[in-house]
Image: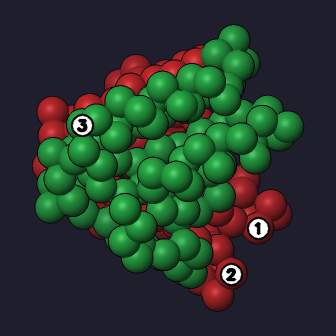
Chain colours: A green, B red
Amino acid sequence: MFVIVVYDTLAERNPGILRTCRQYLHWVQRSVFQGELSAAQHRKLLSAIKQHIDPTYDSVLIYRTQGPHHIQTDLIGQPLGNTDPIL
Amino acid sequence: MFVIVVYDTLAERNPGILRTCRQYLHWVQRSVFQGELSAAQHRKLLSAIKQHIDPTYDSVLIYRTQGPHHIQTDLIGQPLGNTDPIL
């Protein structure tokens, strides 16, 4: 599946969730990661995110499509991240 | 189509792009909007975004799927925005 994660967390928790997302996905923009994951990796990612946020304050949205061909992307301006394979 | 916009712009340009996105989409998180658009609305949104950013510095990613049923969303933590119809 193709996954996009966007998060809005208290600044002091940003490094933890950044590290977590980086283990599974590509950084594409401030607070935004994306990449292809298996169902098992997706489950592990959600579980890892839960351990790094305060659910009473933070917000994390995890979008997923069946694959990268089910979603199109337009970029306006600068490409900040990269989409090199990491897994 | 279903559209997600994430942006990383210089702080002084945030209000402009926020206003632009709000005209077409729902705010769901800091720097993240989503919603359903027609092809014409999508074109207008991209054009409006281009007028509000500096492409040599800012970065805006516009994801789209054929419809909301082509993408699933998991939320961890707080729902910040709303998804009431606006258009």
Whole-number angstrom distance, CA of label 1 to CA of label 2: 8 Å
Residue A62 at x, y percent in the picture: 42, 36
User: Foreground: B6 or B38?
Assistant: B6
* Foreground disc of the pair 2, 3: 3
Q: Residue at x 69, y 66 (%)?
A: B9
Q: Is residue A65 visible?
A: yes
Q: Chain of mark 3?
A: A
Q: Chain of mark 2?
A: B
Does residue A35 appear left or right of residue A23 in this picture?
A: left
Does residue A53 appear left or right of residue B64 in this picture?
A: right
Q: Residue at x 72, y 53 (%)?
A: B15
Q: Which residue is disc 3 drawn over?
A: A39
Whole-number angstrom distance, CA of label 3 to CA of label 1: 36 Å
Q: Label 1's element?
A: loop
Q: Residue at x 24, y 44 (%)?
A: A38
The local crowd at label 3, few if under 14, some if 14 to 19, many if 20 or more residues have their Cα within 10 Å, is few
Amino acid type of the residue tagged 1 in the rendering:
Leu
**Location of residue A32 with respect to A61 vertically, above or below:** below
Amino acid type of the residue tagged 3 in the rendering:
Ala
Q: Which residue is disc 2 drawn over?
A: B57
Residue A25 at x, y percent in the picture: 45, 55
Amino acid type of the residue tagged 2 in the rendering:
Tyr
Q: Which residue is disc 1 drawn over?
A: B10
Whole-number angstrom distance, CA of label 2 to CA of label 3: 36 Å
Identify the disc placed on residue B52.
Answer: none
The answer to the question of whether label 3 and label 1 lie on touching residues, with beta carbons closer than 8 A, is no
